[in-house]
């Protein structure tokens, strides 16, 4: 029996879903990503979805901080 048929083995031909990328970016940003998810992320053939997700998260985070500061300060 080959090991590639097991469902918990990471596969390089499966692309991550949008939700998986966003959850990985959020978990990595706050430092609580599980080893299983990290291995799944690093087994992907292209880092581009994670780079784009990280950039989007960073821009939204900075804009939300600016928005909160503008609401608090007159």
Image (cartoon, helix red, strand yellow):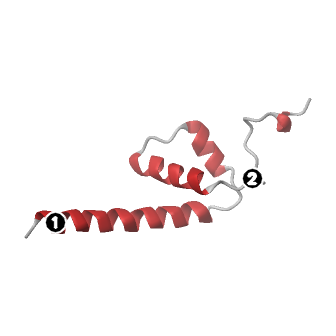
**Viewed as shown, does residue 15 lie left or right of 2?**
left
Q: Which residue is mark 2?
A: 14
Q: State which quarter of the image contains the C terminus.
A: bottom left
**Viewed as shown, does residue 11 lie left or right of 37?**
right
Q: State which quarter of the image contains the N terminus.
A: top right
Residue located at (76% from left, 35% from top): 7
Position in image of residue 12 (x %, y %): 75, 52
Position in image of residue 18 (x %, y %): 59, 57
In the rendered view, would you say 8 is above or below 18? above
Specify the label residue 71 is tagged with.
1
Q: CA distance from mark 2 to mark 1?
A: 43 Å
Q: Residue furthest left?
A: 74
| Residue placed most toward the observer, 69 or 32 | 69
In the rendered view, would you say 1 is above or below 34? above
Position in image of residue 51 (x %, y %): 54, 64
Q: Quadrant of residue 73?
A: bottom left
Residue located at (58% from left, 44% from top): 38
Residue located at (60% from left, 63% from top): 49
Residue located at (38% from left, 65% from top): 60
Q: Secondary structure at mark 2?
A: loop
Reading the chain from its start, which is encountered first: label 2 or label 1? Answer: 2
Q: Residues within 10 Å of mark 2 (few under 14, many from 20)?
A: few
């Amino acid at each position: 029996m080959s090991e590639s048929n097991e469902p918990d083995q990471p596969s390089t031909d499966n692309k991550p879903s949008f939700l998986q990328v966003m959850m990985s970016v959020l978990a990595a940003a706050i430092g609580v990503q599980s080893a299983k998810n990290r291995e799944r992320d690093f087994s992907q053939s292209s880092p581009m979805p994670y780079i784009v997700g990280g950039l989007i998260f960073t821009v939204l985070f900075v804009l939300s901080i600016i928005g909160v500061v503008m609401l608090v300060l007159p």
